[in-house]
Amino acid sequence: MWIFGRKGPSGFSACSTAEEVTQGIDGTGRTAIVTGSSSGIGVETARVLALRGVHVVMAVRNMDAGKNVKESIIKEIPTAKIEVMELDLSSMASVRKFAKEYNSSGLPLNLLINNAGVMATPFMLSQDNIELQFATNHLGHFLLTNLLLETMKNTVRESKIEGRIVNLSSEGHRFAYREGIRFDKINDESGYKSIFAYGQSKLSNILHANELARSLKEEGVNITCQFTSSRSNCYQSSASPQLYQWELQQHAMWHCIHKYRG
């Protein structure tokens, strides 16, 4: 099991760092968007991609935090090509604005990492009146991917290099509501369970990746779409492999402790 650091077919385990997994890879000439890269595992993803020569676009909600991360990466890697763009995945207007600006920028798109997310929040609605976890973790990324897909297809045709879309899922997908995705009860506050709602959003990430992969294969486009867990070795920090997953879990644990105390 991953907690024991057992190596898989790739030769890596959950204890492997991002730098170890990408050792020897030259990403020069490729451009990647990483959502949620101002904190957590998104920071390490952006840093290591930049280390390997990839032009990284940090898509972040908090621009100040994003700029601070950018500065720290450039301080460590002076040759890094990295920029910050604003994106709030809980707002469909923000997603459309980001995609419009990116598509008109002239930048290619080789890699889209749908990493951003919230976990086990108390019940609340997004700006579009959609349950926050479902809106942020699934719908925002679903719309973003669709709006950027043509740009990635064009990049693939022109560069002859395979494109890749990665949805960051979670083992939490196993803990969705009993009926799976409750499409008719997304905004049902009375039956809301924060962990189940999180699992529902993560299950949606997986189904989205699977269906998009099928569709792209049928279309004959050289783009791979896949999902991965936050426990995947390619997202571990070289400084502390468990640090970034812990950041995401802090709120969930705080919420559960206070919920059951009171």
Image (tube, rainbow, N blue to C red):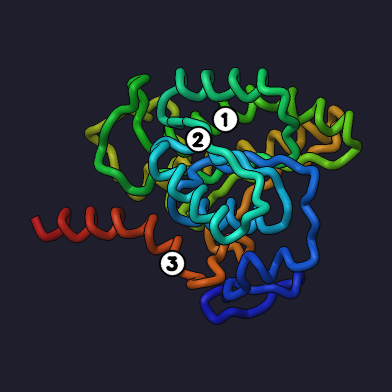
Residue at the location (63% across, 22% down)?
147
Q: CA distance from mark 1 to mark 2?
A: 6 Å
Q: Residues within 10 Å of mark 2 (few under 14, many from 20)?
A: many
Q: State whether residue 177 appears in this view.
A: no
The percent coordinates of residue 39 (x first, y second) are 43, 51
Examine the image and state in which quarter residue 51 appears: bottom right
Query: How far apart are labels 3 and 2 at the CA level?
Result: 24 Å
Asked whether 88 or 139 is in front, the reply is 88
Residue at the image position 66 percent from the left and 26 percent from the top: 148
Q: Position of residue 173 (x, y in %)?
A: 49, 50
- Residue located at (81% from left, 25% from top): 154
In the image, 95 versus 59, the foreground residue is: 59
Q: Is residue 89 visible?
A: yes
- Secondary structure, mark 1, is helix
Q: Nearer the viewer, mark 3 or mark 2?
A: 3
Q: Amino acid at mark 3?
A: Leu
Residue picked out by circle 3: 243
Which quarter of the rendered picture does the N terminus lie within? bottom right
| Residue bearing the label numbered 1 | 142
Cβ–Cβ below 8 Å for labels 3 and 2?
no
For marks 3 and 2 on the same chain, the one whose residue lies earlier in the sequence: 2
Left or right: residue 254 compared with residue 132? left
- The answer to whether the residue labelled 1 contacts the one labelled 2, judged by CB atoms less than 8 Å apart, is yes
Q: Is residue 225 left or right of residue 127?
A: right
Q: Position of residue 74 (x, y in %)?
A: 57, 53
Q: Which residue is mark 2?
A: 138
Which amino acid does the dot numbered 2 rest on? His
Q: Amino acid at mark 1?
A: Phe
Compared with 235, 187 (above or below) is above
Looking at the rendered structure, the number of numbered marks drawn on it comes to 3
Q: CA distance from mark 3 to mark 1?
A: 27 Å
